Image (spheres, rainbow, N blue to C red):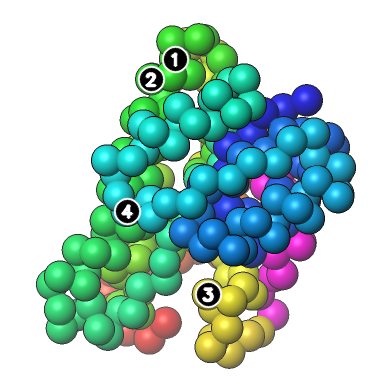
Amino acid sequence: MRKILILGATSAIAEHCARIWAARGDALYLVARNEERLKTMTADLIVRGAEQAHSFCVDLNDMQKHVALLDAAETAMGGIDTVLIAHGTLSNQKACEQNVEQTLAEINTNALSVISLLTHIANRFEAKQSGTIAVISSVAGDRGRASNYVYGSAKAMVTAFTSGLRQRLHKSNVAVVTIKPGFVDTPMTASFKKGLLWAKPDHVAPKIVQAIDKRKYEVYVPTFWWVVMAAIRLLPVRVFLKLTF
């Protein structure tokens, strides 16, 4: 039985991962801002087979509370062996271009709060010489684009941070899994026009759980995004500047 902490647990992708773990009989500790949603989810996960399901309501932008929530999760489950960090917001790029405070708030939510959590969790796992840390980054972090470079730059920071953290913790038997979803049809992307490149949360969640089980280094979900982003990264700047995506 795994003892799994899920940060940003009410996100669509995290919820579908939690359902898979519940069906396996794992213990779950959910963290998010919406207390009512957390209560509903914990009750549902117990019905689905979770050994335990606890919750902690907090705004993860409040970094002063990160230590307290980790202490609470360890106490409730008798330890933590796996963490999934899934919280974040999809930035309003146009609004950010006109407002420095909004830009910095998006960087804080999508990168700095994640880095704070990663630092605390890494030190705890390093001390006990075991554990798996999975973080949902994004393909948007692979190359900044005009349409979403505020969000993309935050995710690029997370990807670079987890790369270094993975190398640091390798000798301590701690795995760091960087997950890069492409377009996923969730409430956060409800206003977007959908096409062939879009996937549903219940399609990407099993691939994320599998990557965590296998302690992979970095995964694109769905897998074809590795090819898409490799092509985008290789585009010469003079060609890239003429594109409108």
Crowding near the residue tagged with mark 3, few <14, some 14–19, many ≥20 C-alpha atoms within 10 Å: few
Disc 2 designates what residue?
A: 123
Residue type at tag 2 = Asn
Residue 74: which numbered mark, if any?
none
Position of residue 68 relative to residue 22, above or below, is: above
Q: Secondary structure at mark 1?
A: helix
Q: Nearer the viewer, mark 3 or mark 4?
A: 4
- CA separation in Å, label 2 and label 4: 20 Å
Residue 61: which numbered mark, if any?
4
Residue drawn 49% across the image and 31% down it: 72
Disc 1 designates what residue?
A: 126
Residue type at tag 1 = Glu
Q: Secondary structure at mark 3?
A: helix
Q: Answer with left or right where residue 113 lies relative to residue 31.
A: left
Q: Answer with left or right where residue 66 lies relative to residue 132.
A: left
Marks 1,2: beta carbons within 8 A? yes
Please provide the residue range marked out in magenta: 196-209
- CA separation in Å, label 1 and label 2: 5 Å
